[in-house]
Image (spheres, rainbow, N blue to C red):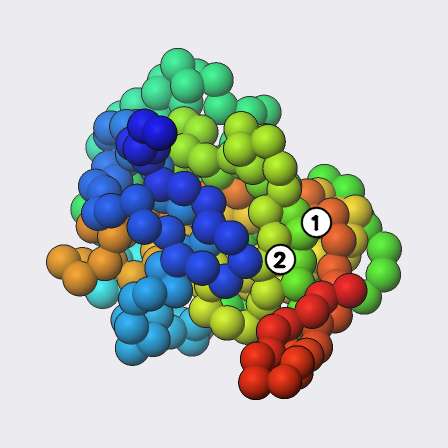
């Protein structure tokens, strides 16, 4: 069987083994897996606490991430306007979905231009398209969801629809990109949400990980189901049953 050249979606709680990939804002050729790196050391998982006051800005490794409305276009610098035009042009070439955020980069500083989006106290950016019903998922439970993942250029880098089945994993086992898991926990079954994961809530980066650049990830997600799980002991063996 031919080996997939891009990142694969893992089974519940299992790591991707697709190998190390580069990810660049100006080159839309790589993919990141949603079920990211259980095999990476827990010490590499980025902290979920921000080093700046929550709300407008977050600082990560010298870079600043801002969520800004489209009304600020008139106050942008010439360099920022050029970055905006370039990002919009590439997004159009990639057939990015409607209402997709625009990303203005100046070094590690990122302005995320998007209207109608919210930002929580941990720096996660999201927009709900449909509200679900029922309780929010919690650590230890299994979530089943469909998703499409995009990079900053609006290029589709992964999708459960392309895989032909929803993804399923348990929460609280470090099996998901931190910001993506935060976004899932804020949903209810049946809900549809766009989650923008900034670098400070993204996967670990560096030589010892699969990821090599600080980039934003965008996910369109529909939460299908939430199940409670328990450990079952059978003689000398045990497993986890979710129902």
**Is the residue under label 1 in contact with that under label 2 (CB below 8 Å)?**
yes
Picture quadrant of residue 102: top left
* 94 is higher (above) or lower (below) than 114: above
Residue pointed to by mark 2: 184
Q: In this rendered view, identify the residue nearer to me: 210 or 135.
A: 210
Q: Residue at x 85, y 61 (%)?
A: 134
Asked which secondary structure carries label 2, the reply is helix
Q: Name the residue under label 1.
A: 223
Q: Which of 71 and 49 is in front in this view?
A: 49
Q: Nearer the viewer, residue 99 or 182?
A: 182
Indicate which disc, 2 or 1, sits on the residue closer to the N terminus.
2
Q: In the figure, is residue 215 to the left or right of 222? A: left
Inter-mark Cα distance, 2 to 1: 7 Å
Residue at image point 54% right, 58% down: 12
Can you tell which mark lies on residue 200? none
Asked if residue 224 is positioned above or below residue 100 in the image, the reply reads below
Residue for point 61% across, 53% down: 168
Q: Which of 73 and 233 is in front in this view?
A: 233
Left or right of residue 188: residue 194:
left
């Amino acid at each position: 069987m031919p080996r997939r050249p891009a990142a694969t979606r893992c089974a519940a709680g299992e790591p991707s083994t697709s190998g190390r990939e580069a990810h660049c804002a100006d080159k839309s050729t790589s993919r990141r897996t949603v079920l990211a790196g259980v095999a990476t050391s827990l010490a590499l998982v980025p902290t979920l606490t921000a080093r700046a006051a929550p709300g407008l800005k977050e600082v990560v490794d010298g870079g600043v991430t801002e969520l800004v409305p489209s009304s600020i276009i008139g106050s942008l610098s010439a360099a920022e306007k050029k970055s905006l035009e370039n990002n919009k042009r590439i997004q159009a070439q990639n057939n990015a979905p409607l209402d997709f955020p625009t990303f203005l980069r100046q070094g590690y500083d990122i302005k995320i231009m998007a209207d109608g989006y919210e930002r929580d106290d941990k720096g996660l950016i999201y927009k709900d398209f449909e509200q679900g019903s029922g309780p929010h998922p919690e650590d230890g439970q299994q979530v089943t969801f469909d998703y499409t993942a995009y990079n900053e250029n609006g290029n589709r880098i992964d999708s459960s629809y392309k895989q032909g089945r929803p993804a399923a994993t348990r929460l609280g086992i470090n099996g998901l990109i931190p910001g993506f898991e935060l976004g899932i926990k804020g949903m209810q079954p049946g809900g549809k949400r766009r989650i923008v994961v900034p670098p400070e809530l993204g996967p670990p980066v560096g030589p010892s990980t699969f990821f090599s650049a600080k980039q934003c990830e965008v996910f369109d997600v529909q939460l299908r189901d939430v199940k409670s799980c328990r450990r079952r002991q059978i003689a000398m063996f045990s497993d986890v049953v979710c129902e």
